[in-house]
Each structure stands twice: as C-alpha cells, then as structure tokens.
Image: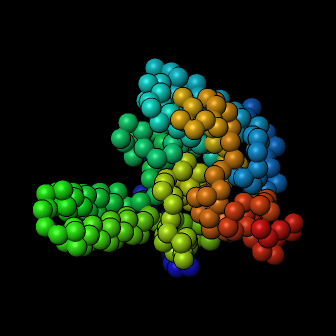
Amino acid sequence: MTRIAVQGTPEGAGSGLTTRLNPGGVLIPFDASAASSALPPRFPSPFRPGVAHPLVAQASAETQAFLDGERGLPRRLFEGPTGGKMMGVLVVRAEDGRLGYLRAFAGAVDGRDRIEGFAPPLFEVERYRDVWREGSAAITELDERIQATCTSDADRRALEQEQRALSHSVHERLWASYRIPNGRGERSDLPSLFAPRRPPGGAGDCAAPKLLALAYSMGATPIALGEFWWGKAPPGGGRQHGVHYPACRGRCGVILPFMLEGIDCEAAPDVGMRPVGNPGDPGFQPG
C-alpha cells in the first residue's frame, strides 16, 4: 500500500488558524449542556450497529431538523427513482477545545459534490472533473464509431476492446485523484487501498470517509460517528428514513481501517477485508 507522510498544514486547510479550525463554518458547536457530556473512552467502531453515543444521536437529530427546515435540502432531492442518501455526522473536539460535529452526505446531491455546511469530497475536484470530461468525450466518440461501423465483426470487436481499455484507464485515473488521509498524517489513494482488486463503485464517496478527512484537515479529534438514511428507500429496500446504519463493508470496510490508523479506536473483529483499530492497542482483535 502506498503511504505518503504529510508535513505541515494538511491539504485543503487554510493558512490562518481561524480558517483551519472551522473552514467554511462546517463545525456546528454543541450547546453548553451537551458540551459537558461524558465522552466515549475510545472512538466507537463505525461498523457497530445502533447509535454510537448520545452526542451522535443529538447531532443526527439536529441535522435531520436542519434538512427538514427552510434552510435545509428539499426533500424532493431524496425521493427520486434511486431513493435517498446516507447522511453522516461526526462528533469532534476542535483544536481550540470546542465540542461540535460535522455533517456529510454520501455521493452527490442534485448533481453537486460540494454544498455549504457539508464535508467536501475526497477527490481533487478539478483533476477529477478534467479526467471525467476528457474520458467521457473519448468513450462517447468510440461508442459512436462502434454504432456506425459497417465493417467486419473483427473490426467491431477491436473497437469495443479499445473502448473497454479506455474506460478502465479513465477509472484508474479517477480513483487516483482521491486523497485519503489517516490519523497518522499519512495519505493514500483508492487503487493502493484496494489492491490487487479494483475499487468498487462509489468507493471513497460515503459520508464517513468525507467526515474523517475533514476532521483531520481541521486538526480536530474524531470522537464518534453516525450515519443515517434520509429519504425514500432504495429500489432494493434495506433502508428506512431516519434510521441509523453501520458503515458499509464493501467500501468502508477497506477505507476506514486505514483512515482510523493513529486513532484510539474500539476494535471491530468483523468488518470486511481489514481490522479496525491499531495493532498493539488494548483489546485489539484482528479481523
């Protein structure tokens, strides 16, 4: 696995302390009564069912109230044919000692990767868009050539093979645009984390990785995480509006163990391809 140690201010953080502590005003502080709550002794496993901590429940309730409010995101955005979205909250301790939480949505909402008040994507936006725009145009051109060809089957198969190879190359470049940090100050990308397999669709776009990356960029300490479904159930079912769910196994089961390295994290013995927690920690159990 490729690991890059990062020195100094993390990517995306501002040069000034105020910007670093709360870039774009994404940290929502708890009130005084919540700030005095007892905190978990270790970061609860994001793969554990249920709500990890009372502050996660409060952050989720406040986020749901915000989503339903006048300044929130219209419910129609979560009622389309593919259903709603996983939303996430991460309770953090900011560098200045304030206790609050961050918010994120999985994937994009209404075609937007970035929405004020929510964690940004993990990929380098301009690089990702350039690769997507150029790659999509080239794939479309090949598709038009395939559809228009009146030559032999061999020529058609050659064009289809060229298109598959191009699509594979475009996806590799898109995955490489993701910058995934961990609690040790290291960074990796999707191809390195999933090697020798290819990353599955949507890898790196879940709410949980976005939240941890934002916390690290702010110099904040992650305390507890929660994700809940918002909106219409997906076509395959399995999700209910407003209900909390553990982090997914197929994507986050690979990404989160790396991101939580360097964090005092509750061990999770069965999360997929890699264990959560740090070898040598008390209570650590390999997966």
Quadrant in which residue 240 is drawn: top right
* Total numbered labels: 0
Residue at image coords 75%, 54%:
45
In the figure, is residue 64 to the left or right of 80?
right
Image quadrant where one finds the C terminus? bottom right
Q: Is residue 258 visible?
A: yes
Asked if 228 appears above or below 278 in the picture, the reply is above
Residue at image coords 80%, 49%:
40
Residue at image coords 63%, 42%:
227
In the figure, is residue 39 to the left or right of 96?
right
Asked if 99 appears above or below 169 in the picture, the reply is above
Q: Is residue 96 visible?
A: no
**Most foreground residue, 154 or 144:** 154
Image quadrant where one finds the N terminus? bottom right
Q: By what rule are the colours in the image chosen?
A: rainbow
- Determine the residue located farthest toward the front in the rendered image: 152
Q: Position of residue 15 (x, y in %)?
A: 41, 60
Quadrant in which residue 64 is drawn: top right
Q: Position of residue 144 (x, y in %)?
A: 17, 57
**Most foreground residue, 100 or 120:** 120
- Determine the residue located farthest toward the right in the rendered image: 283
**Most foreground residue, 166 or 38:** 166
Asked if 215 appears above or below 76 in the picture, the reply is below
In the figure, is residue 91 to the left or right of 203?
right
Q: Position of residue 25 (x, y in %)?
A: 47, 42
**Most foreground residue, 172 or 212:** 172
Asked if 181 appears above or below 32 in the picture, the reply is below
Residue at image coords 55%, 48%:
207
Q: Position of residue 135 (x, y in %)?
A: 26, 62
